[in-house]
Image: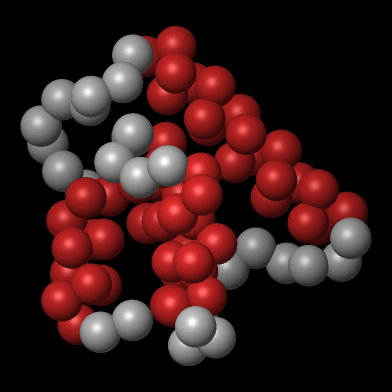
Amino acid sequence: MDKNEKAWLMNVATRITPSRITAEEMERRRKMVQSAVHSNAMEGARHCPDVDPIFDAFINGDIEVTEILPLIKKLRKFA
């Protein structure tokens, strides 16, 4: 992930403008993320906070679920 992409992601995750999705959808997405983190922990994978901005962008409605894994791979230099 280059500096511009990382800056964009941090900006999205910390933005002040209102979300484009409803509060109910945000809560549904938050629960999805919590469930995935818990499931991974049950499998022995620990949560790394460096992916939190990606999860926050998903929760806030700025990215879709299909964009999460490619962004994590890019962050970790697997893509």
* Residue at the far right in the pictured view: 43
* Residue at the far left in the pictured view: 17
What is the quadrant of the N terminus in the image?
bottom left
Report x, y in % for residue 21.
Answer: 31, 21
Side of 16 relative to 75 (left or right): left
Side of 28 relative to 14 (left or right): right
In front here: 73 or 55?
73
69 relative to 78, above or below: above
5 relative to 62, above or below: below
Report x, y in % for residue 38.
Answer: 76, 46
Q: Quadrant of residue 64?
A: top left
Q: Quadrant of residue 61?
A: top left
In front here: 22 or 49?
22
Q: Residue at x 55, y 62 (%)?
A: 69
11 relative to 58, above or below: below
Report x, y in % for residue 35.
Answer: 71, 38
Residue 38 in sight: yes
63 relative to 20, above or below: below
Q: Residue at x 25, y 84 (%)?
A: 2
Report x, y in % for residue 60.
Answer: 33, 34
Residue 49 in sight: no
Side of 42 relative to 76 (left or right): right
